[in-house]
Amino acid sequence: MRAFKRPQSLGMLVATVAAAGLVPLTAGAADAAPPAKPADYAGSCPTAGTITQGWHSGHDGVDIANNRGTPIYSAGPGTVIVSGTASGYGQWIRIRHDDGTVTEYGHMYERLVSVNQRVSGGQLIARMGSEGQSTGPHLHFEAHSSTSSTRGMDPVPYLAARGVSLPCTPGSGTPGTNFTTWGTSVRVRADARLNAAVVRTLTGPTPVFVECQKHGDVVNAEGYSNDAWSYIPGLGGYVSNIYIDHPAAWLPGVREC
């Protein structure tokens, strides 16, 4: 793991990024107004299947039925706040998203994420099951306004506001950004190799969605050495993790390609 440090131009970099509207500038703003609530994230389809029960006064979510083992995905980027067993659900997962809302997933037979893990939109988090109070394999999906909410809101308009219509096909929706690059003249390559074709060059800090990461050629730059590369589908290639603005050499919450 590399230490979280940057060249002397860090202050200028942060100011440049903030001025471009890419990230909020909070450091040194003692009298600034409270930060605005994060914008709604761009959603991802939680699973494929048939809706067998919708949201109503006696049912806080929507049930999507399919075969046992059907993949279940995170509806958006966020942090896992619950992953375990629960009465009624058998097993469940809760994810707090960057806009403060929470999505809830129940009845799976296998959980693939743990508490405090950072996940991206569309990331595989579980497999469908029929544990707990259930009559067959399905995903019970809920959406909450906050972690303190006791009643789920209707998931259909909640997801629709984020670009996903139920029922849906996994892979639909546009994943939100989960990282930001830093530096200038950052080369995006067709593969995680220094001799791979350059498909794009970033002129400055850029919000990106990192889909996955893998080990490739060792890059020596900016005082670091790292063989980890991030795949950014929106840019059509890989960027050395040295140029992803995160203190970890291997990004947490991002699967391996």
Image (cartoon, rainbow, N blue to C red):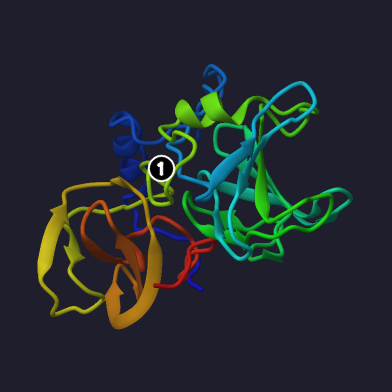
> Residue 113 in the image: x percent, y percent?
64, 62
Q: Amino acid at mark 1?
A: Gly
Residue shown at the point (79%, 58%) measured from the top left = 131
Q: Position of residue 96 (x, y in %)?
A: 64, 41
Q: Is residue 145 above or below residue 197?
A: above
**Residue 253: percent from left, percent from top:** 54, 61
Judged from the image, the secondary structure of the residue bearing numbered disc 1 is loop
Horizontal arrangement in the rendering, residue 230 relative to residue 58 (left or right):
left
**Residue furthest out toward the bottom:** 217
Snapshot quadrant of residue 50: top right
- Position of the C terminus by quadrant: bottom left
Q: Residue at x 14, y 76 (%)?
A: 196
Q: Nearer the viewer, residue 6 or 186?
A: 186
For residue 183, side relative to residue 153 (left or right): left
State the residue in front, 199 or 35. Answer: 199
Mark 1 = which residue? 176
Classify residue 71 as left or right of residue 137.
left
Would you identify the image quadrant in which residue 164 lies? top left
Say above or below: 196 vs 161: below
Q: Dot 1: few (<14), some (14–19), or many (≥20) neighbours within 10 Å?
A: many
- Quadrant of residue 97 in the image? top right
Q: Is residue 4 visible?
A: yes
Q: Does any portion of residue 39 appear in the rendered image?
A: no
Residue at image position (60%, 66%) is: 69
Which residue is pictured at 16% across the width and 48% down the height?
203
